[in-house]
Amino acid sequence: MAAAILSQFSDALAELSAGARNFLASARAEDGSTLTGVLWKPDAVVVSEQALGDARSYEVNAAGNIAKAELAGRDPGTNVAVLKLDRALAQALPSAAVPRVAELALLLGRSGSDATARLAMVRSVGGAWQSLAGGTIDHRITLDGYIGSAEEGGPVLSASGAIFGVAARGARRESLVIPAATVERAVTVILEKGGVERGWLGVSLHPVALPETLRPEGAQRVGLMVMDIVADGPAAKAGVLVGDILISAGGVAANRPGKIARQLGSTSIGKKLDITLARAGAIVTREATIEARKPA
């Protein structure tokens, strides 16, 4: 009985993997490097932005069908990059689903011409969150299994065949899933505009220790020194100078660059941001209007 159940389970996983053949894709760059991707639309393949190199032209293989592709755009905030194909391919992307904790997840990838698969369990499912690059992710989905380079950017499927999203390797070896809803939103904007606009202050920041006399209520020990500033950028227009130490922005302690980046999402453009600075031993305040930085 146990052997029969295991055999049925194994067969079901193999069938699930085989059924993904039409939307599991690989992309080969001009230098020979390869990426796993998902044929998200008949003429567009999603790949992992953080795994993408500098190439702009690719050869895409999906279900044995070959197409040329050009980089349509990339969004570091959601770890989504899109390759636009020169022709439409047959595609049958399954319906999207949000996983539940303890559900099984099948991660698919491509290693050269070979398909790969890993089985994992959904470790946690949280609410919306913002990446260090300022992108809004609809759910924080983590897996208990390892994501290899072959699976990075590949589809993550439920046991019923629905697509949870795209596999991504996070900080501290976290195994993440970029939800299908997030991917869909990024793909739509990238294909329309070539990228996703996000807020920008136009400064380069580096953590430094705050003198005790400048610590807000004695609690914050670290600030962010302005190492460089873009002429005519939002910070420059607000009167921020190189050498200033950023103590807070928008009421949030500026002790890590990521805390600033999280306030500069696409909805921040045009908004005012109150900035508190340490300058020559004194505290000064400025107000910057967040602008959009055009995609690279």
Image (spheres, rainbow, N blue to C red):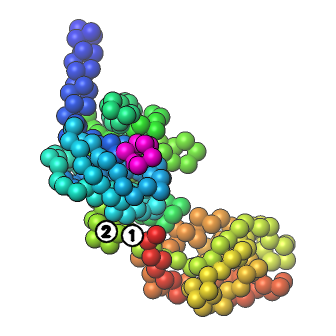
Mark drawn on residue 204: none
Quickly name the residue at label 2.
Answer: 189
Residue drawn at the location 24% of the way across and 49% of the way down = 67
Q: Quadrant of residue 124?
A: top left
Residue drawn at the location 51% of the way across and 43% of the way down = 174
Instruction: State left or right for residue 284 relative to residue 187.
Output: right
Front in this rendered view, residue 153 or 208:
153
Quadrant where the N terminus is found in the figure: top left
Q: Residues within 10 Å of mark 1 (few under 14, many from 20)?
A: many
Rendering coords of residue 185 (x, y %) = 30, 63
Q: Quadrant of residue 11?
A: top left
Quickly name the residue at label 1.
Answer: 196
Rendering coords of residue 131 (x, y %) = 49, 60
Mark 2–mark 1 Cα distance, whole angstroms, equals 6 Å
Q: Is residue 29 magenta?
A: yes
**Of pointers 2 and 1, the one earlier in the residue sequence:** 2
**Stretch of the chain drawn in magenta:** 28-35
Q: Is residue 214 above or below residue 147?
A: below
> Mark 2 falls on what kind of element?
helix
Check if mark 2's residue and mark 1's residue have beta carbons within 8 Å: yes
